[in-house]
Amino acid sequence: IKMKSSIKKMSALLTMMAIAIFTFTFTGCSDEATPESDNKILKPLADNILGKWSMKESYKKLDGKWVEDPIPEGQGQTYTIRTDGTVLSAFTAPDGYTKLNLGEWKTDEAANKLTLGTMTVDVLSLNATLFEMGYGEALDAETGELMDGEFRWKYSRMDETQKTLAEKLIGKWNYSKSYEKINGKWVEISLGLEFDESGLLFREDGLVTVYSRNGEDENTHDMNWSVNNATGKLRCMYKGQKPMEVNIEIGVDETLSVFSTGQTTTGGAMAVFIR
């Protein structure tokens, strides 16, 4: 019964592709600057700000003094500032789920300001490895609401080749095969879905486009997506509807496996996608 239920779930998941199967915005998550901070700024900003930055410390002003505002466990943020004028934000909430958002960036060299998407911050310091910025709003980790005040954050430079599961998902994945686990082994099955092409397109703007095509007849649909980089749990959701969760895994052979019930030895179903 469990096996039939797993196949049914996977069939439903893939059938959605036929009709269209399968937001975080830029807010203040930036850099700290304490009275002891090095406030030297490498110029020009536009050249020295390029790269990938990870938030390390957070401060807020209380009663005229800067105090540390501890980053909740599990929460994090990175900005990847690119030469093409785009900036990729990756925000990880305390529940471990990471959302991506894509925007544009620019600098005001005279005023030492940096615009990231819809947010313009003050560049307080910048060297080869550290970057500090200040802003008048911040995102409350518990309520998700914007708070007014004075905030500063510190970011450190990262190796751009270090990519999380969320970043590795970006791109187009074509549906290949489906499997059922029988007696601990994956056995290929047919779900009776006939498409010339179908699959998933994970985008940097936080949407996943589900597509299918038969001849000139194409169907697409967009869903919001986020992923838990540690557990491999993918969450997809149509706006205003209950999210759908599946387990995923990217193999060394650049295949994407989607599991209906996880990798169990007593049953389950899996769909495999290729680049």
Image: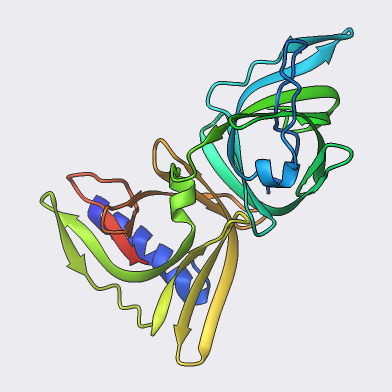
- Left or right of 6? Residue 245 is right
Residue that lies at the very extreme toward the front in this rendered image: 43
Residue beneath the point at 21% across and 50% down: 267
Picture mark count: 0
Residue beneath the point at 12% across and 49% down: 184
Residue beneath the point at 49% across and 49% down: 167
Position of residue 69 relative to residue 242, above or below, is above
Residue 189: quadrant of the picture? bottom left
Of residue 159 and residue 65, the one placed in the foreground of this image is 159
Residue that lies at the very extreme toward the left in this rendered image: 183
Q: Is residue 49 visible?
A: no
Image position, residue 239 (x, y; %): 66, 56
Residue 5: quadrant of the picture? bottom left
Of residue 35 and residue 188, the one placed in the foreground of this image is 35
Image position, residue 249 (x, y; %): 34, 50
Image position, residue 165 (x, y; %): 43, 46
Position of residue 179 relative to residue 138, above or below, is below
Q: Quadrant of the C terminus?
A: bottom left
Position of residue 81 relative to residue 207, above or below, is above
Image position, residue 126 (x, y; %): 70, 30
- Left or right of 185? Residue 162 is right
Q: How is the image coloured?
A: rainbow
Q: Is residue 194 visible?
A: yes
Residue 59: quadrant of the picture? top right
Residue beneath the point at 46% across and 71% down: 17
Of residue 100 and residue 82, the one placed in the foreground of this image is 82
